[in-house]
Amino acid sequence: MTNQGNNLDRWYDSYAQRTAGLAASEVRALFAVASRPEVVSLAGGMPFVSALPRDLVTGAMERVMRENGPVALQYGSGQGAPMLREHILEVMALEGIRGSVDDVVVTTGSQHALELVSKIFLDPGDVVLAEGPSYVTAMVVFKSFQAQVEHVATDDDGLVPAALRERIARLKADGKRIKFLYTVPTFSNPSGVTLSWERRLEVLEIARSNGILVLEDNPYGLLYFDSPPPHAMRSVEEEGVVYLGTFSKTLAPGFRVGWALAPHAIREKLILANEAAVLSPSSFTQLIISEYLSTADWRGQIDTFRNVYRERRDAMLQALGDYLPDLSWTVPHGGFYVWLKLPDNIDSKSMLPRAVKELVAYTPGTAFYANGDGRNFMRLAFCYPTPDFIREGIRRLSTVINGELELLNTFSQTSPLATIRPEHNNISPPANLG
């Protein structure tokens, strides 16, 4: 008798093997509970789009429809609108990147660009090198193409070159094919750390000498809080780097517009893959962004976002120092995230239901490793909640962590972590807190 699938899905045995890698990320699973209005969500990396004046966007929309409506509502090029690609060059120039408009491919968000690069490079069993920890949904993409993700150790200065050399040598000795190194070198997701300039040059040399492509994902590079970060890796290496960018963090994610800057031969394959996937990226959203960049003070708007996120970063660091002074965490100089280290005997994933019960959410560290590491870490996002609610969220989180430690102490007879007992207050998060 032929197997007719399982009890839940009659088509289970008909799916392609690669669908085994299509699993809901822990970040996605969190949104169902974290979006409840009573929960302070420190989980999702949602930009604070309310800091974007609405008339800037509506004005651009109105002008596009008035002056170029038929074009905006029509199919477009698989490579993207030429005028927008010119503007993208202006944006990348702020990070030291020089390029040709011909080598820019517009995509449906940088996540789509990540999927396209994976599609044209990865065969089953290929290896992708990635920082440990690394962006959760990137690993979902790599696994969906049946690739093996190998993590490389990081520290406060980003990816460790010596660890990269060791990992490459070991994989080559095992006969593995390494297709590319995936990195978020500036204000990394999830750790918030930035790869130093010296290490950027060293990592590029390691990749060059081993014939490994570098996939540089840079959503946060313009969102620095003090001085600008080091220039992008693509600024000093053109043939060996594919650079991914997006307007999701510096404008709004709802437009779903990103891009890839790639060497010529790779660019051609990206365009073909883009056309095969979506035919053409949205002309409407491309023209709106192009109009916005032509008429608005977009650099000033990025400054506004920097100030918003700096204030929230400071609120989170202050709250962590007040409520959990004996723990350790990263101190990001830009971006959206703090990476919190817990005592070794605490599992952040198993603790999450208790946190949600206390009306606070975070992302467990295991979400950012393909091999299940990161058990005693968590990612805290400061980008969306207001400073008051960030402080309240950390207060609630400290209650959960302290309770967990006391419970463990009951069984282990060890001394509990010394913390400051938080004051109780009646702050409730706003109804639209995600």
Image: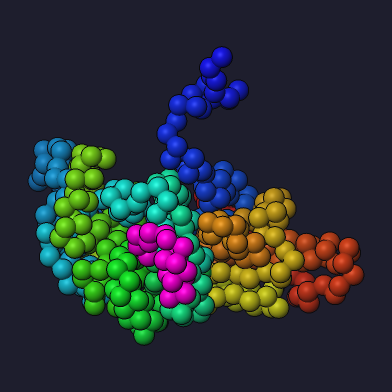
Write the residue at 60% across / 62% down: 373
Residue 235: x and y in percent read 24, 75
Q: Quadrant of residue 402?
A: bottom right
Eyeballing the image, is 310 above or below 288?
below
Write the residue at 35% across / 76% down: 206
In magenta segment, residue 300: no
Farthest residue to the bottom: give it.
Answer: 198
Eyeballing the image, is 51 above or below 356?
below
Q: How is the image coloured?
A: rainbow
Q: Quadrant of residue 74?
A: top left
Does residue 252 show up? Answer: no
Direction from residue 225 to residue 420 in the image, left or right: right
In terms of depth relative to the viewer, which is nearer, 297 or 83? 83
Residue 5: x and y in percent read 54, 23
Direction from residue 244 to residue 74 in the image, left or right: left
Farthest residue to the top: give it.
Answer: 1
In terms of depth relative to the viewer, which is nearer, 348 or 123? 123
Write the residue at 38% across / 61% down: 178
What is the count of numbered marks?
A: 0
Write the residue at 13% across / 45% down: 77
**Magenta residue span:** 165-182
Does residue 364 show up? Answer: yes
Residue 103: x and y in percent read 15, 60
Q: Quadrant of the N terminus?
A: top right
Residue 69: x and y in percent read 13, 40
Q: Quadrant of residue 372?
A: bottom right
Eyeballing the image, is 310 above or below 367?
below
In magenta segment, residue 179: yes
In terms of depth relative to the viewer, which is nearer, 337 or 9? 9
